[in-house]
């Protein structure tokens, strides 16, 4: 087995931008970890229109996989609503409710880790909006969310390559192949042909 | 659908005059095969032999997309146009043999949407008739807002109203009814997609208002068929085919190439799809860019032309065809 796939160009990887304030009837921001910094920058970019924007802004925030918790900096912005949750699974019901009640004209922003943004995009697309309608900005950790192609289990916050699947225990290498539907990269068994021949894990994602 | 793509041989099965301006035509196949199914918003190109001039006009399909027994279109008479619609109105009779293209859809529904907001002006209603049939089959949520000059010209208003009830809203210009666009844009659930088809001014108004209200362009869809504008005759050199042709005043560059036997690609023949884009080798003069495809920079640089709608005046134009 060669490892050329690891270096392959990554056409499936999403492209992230820089959050820009856009006119809209309401604003929804979902961020984790260092993404708080991007939210502060976004509000700064709104300049004079910031108070009007914040009066119609709903922020959902959770700490990053590396433990960064900058919620205080967001609370200080004075948005109409700002909530901190433990992780995405606890944020998700709130996000789905907000999306379900919202009207067209809502601007959606997400920033922080790729794992978070991918899950927000997936849930927004499920609500009928195209992914392009959501603004994204990558900040902080580059750890990946990876799905094992063998047992389909998802391992969060993968740092090394290869790594061990948290569900079935197989040693997987992380392919640069991203699925929008799953919001996850693909992990493929690395010692299928020569069981036990597992190369040493290298820290690729921080 | 470039030259060489198979055409469908048809016979005109029915011509219905809906009002002084609009006629509906039904085509059935002469080779006994079923018509291809299509998706709502698709159009066909109808070929006409107008006294030796070959005309090929695109028309939206309005029949049931799953009906393989025939295709239906509606044609609004344009007395100031180049003659395609007049030919359809004055010469096409039941029993006549014609040719049409396979359906092409440049105005399809995004079926991932939670709701479809359809806005039609005048004859722009036709693609929506097929789309609503499709949405009804699928059980998707939609709402139509149809603005038309007067009840006499509102060809399909009553019919649609009785079929879809309060999901259909009609506005008559002569009774000063206006589409309440600002309110409509305010109240749509997240995941709604908007579709607009009608006159140029209406499309610009609807799209501009929606973007200002925070709708992302990826949720906005529009279709306007530009009839190729008439103008002065001009000469064009076709580099690849080593021919120099003259484009007549009521002919498009695309039609002139076809008449000269040159294979040129197209889909919409209305400046929207991009299929006919052609490189310009030399432009000594100026191109009248009439399309909705090229960017303003491309138009200004005169390095590309869309032969289905654009014209030229000046000394020399050499294109890569
Ligand atoms: S044929 Fe579609 S733009 Fe010319």
Image (cartoon, rainbow, N blue to C red):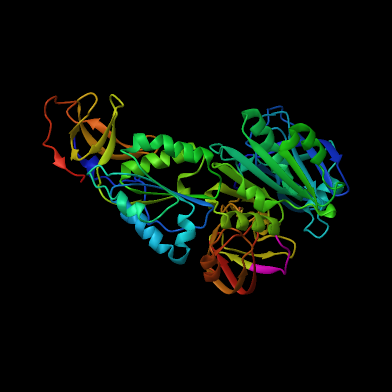
| Relative height, residue B133 to residue A137 (above, below) | above
Q: Nearer the viewer, residue B65 or A158?
A: A158
Q: Where ligand 1 lies, by image quadrant?
A: bottom right
Can residue A188 be seen here? yes
B214 to the left or right of A37: right
Please name the predominant secondary structure of the magenta segment in the image.
Answer: loop
Q: Nearer the viewer, residue A157 or A13?
A: A157
Q: Quadrant of residue A40?
A: bottom left
Q: Quadrant of the N terminus of chain A?
A: top left
> In this rendering, would A171 be left or right of B315?
left
Image point 54% across, 50% down: which residue?
A105
How many numbered circles are shown? Answer: 0
The one nearer the camera, A70 or B185, is: A70
Q: Residue at x 68, y 27 (%)?
A: B33
Asked if the magenta segment contains residue B129, the reply would be no
Residue B194 point in image, percent of width and height = 61, 46
Residue B53's x, y, as percent? 76, 54
> In this image, B255 relative to A173: left or right?
right
Q: Nearer the viewer, residue A167 or A3?
A: A167
- Quarter occupied by residue B203: bottom right
Q: Position of residue A198 (x, y in %)?
A: 12, 31
Q: Residue at x 25, y 46 (%)?
A: A142
Query: Does residue B260 appear anywhere in the picture?
Result: no
Question: Which span of residues is magenta-colored?
Answer: B228-235
Residue at (40%, 63%) from the top-left corner?
A: A45
Instruction: Find residue A102 and report its horizontal and vertical position in percent.
Output: 53, 43
């Amino acid at each position: 087995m060669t490892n050329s796939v690891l270096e392959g160009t990554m056409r499936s990887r999403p492209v992230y931008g820089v959050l820009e304030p856009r006119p809209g009837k309401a604003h929804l921001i979902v961020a984790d970890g260092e993404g708080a910094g991007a939210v502060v920058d976004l509000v700064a970019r709104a300049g004079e229109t910031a108070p009007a924007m914040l009066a119609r802004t709903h922020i959902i925030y959770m700490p990053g996989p590396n433990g960064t918790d900058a919620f205080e900096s967001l609370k200080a912005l004075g948005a109409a609503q700002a909530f901190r949750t433990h992780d995405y699974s606890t944020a998700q019901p709130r996000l789905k409710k907000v999306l379900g009640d919202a009207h067209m004209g809502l601007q959606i922003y997400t920033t922080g880790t790729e794992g978070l943004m991918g899950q927000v995009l997936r849930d927004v697309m499920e609500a009928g909006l195209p992914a392009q309608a959501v603004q994204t900005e990558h900040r902080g950790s580059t750890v990946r969310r990876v799905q094992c192609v063998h047992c389909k289990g998802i391992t969060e916050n993968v740092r090394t390559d290869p790594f061990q699947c948290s569900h079935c225990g197989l040693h997987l290498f992380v392919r640069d192949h991203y699925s929008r539907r799953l919001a996850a990269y693909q992990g493929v068994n690395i010692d299928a042909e020569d069981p036990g021949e597992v190369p040493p894990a290298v820290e690729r994602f921080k | 659908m470039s030259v060489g793509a198979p055409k469908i041989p048809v016979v005109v099965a029915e011509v219905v005059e809906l009002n002084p301006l609009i006629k509906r035509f039904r085509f059935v196949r002469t080779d006994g095969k079923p018509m291809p199914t299509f998706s709502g918003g698709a159009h066909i190109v109808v070929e006409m032999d107008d006294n030796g001039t070959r005309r090929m006009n695109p028309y939206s399909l309005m029949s049931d997309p799953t009906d393989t027994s025939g295709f239906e279109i509606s044609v609004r008479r344009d007395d100031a146009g180049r003659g395609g619609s007049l030919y359809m109105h004055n010469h096409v009779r039941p029993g006549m043999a014609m040719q049409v293209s396979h359906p092409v859809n440049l105005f399809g529904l995004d079926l991932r949407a939670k709701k479809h907001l359809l806005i039609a002006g005048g004859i722009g209603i036709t693609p929506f008739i097929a789309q609503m049939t499709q949405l009804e089959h699928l059980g998707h949520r939609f709402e139509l807002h149809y603005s038309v000059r007067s009840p006499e010209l509102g060809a399909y208003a009553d019919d649609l109203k009785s079929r879809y009830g309060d999901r259909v809203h009609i506005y008559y210009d002569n009774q000063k009814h206006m589409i309440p666009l600002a309110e409509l844009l305010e109240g749509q659930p997240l995941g709604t997609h908007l579709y607009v088809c009608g006159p140029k001014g209406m499309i610009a108004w609807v799209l501009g208002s929606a973007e200002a209200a925070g709708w992302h362009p990826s949720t906005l869809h529009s279709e306007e068929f530009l009839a190729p504008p008439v103008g002065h005759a001009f000469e064009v050199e076709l580099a690849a085919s080593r021919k120099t042709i003259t484009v007549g005043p009521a002919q498009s560059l695309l039609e002139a190439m076809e008449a000269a036997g040159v294979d040129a690609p197209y889909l919409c023949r209305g400046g929207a799809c991009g299929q006919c884009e052609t490189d310009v080798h030399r432009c000594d003069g100026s191109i009248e860019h009439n399309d909705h495809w090229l960017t303003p920079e491309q138009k200004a640089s005169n390095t590309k032309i869309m032969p289905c709608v654009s014209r030229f005046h000046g000394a020399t134009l050499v294109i890569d065809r």
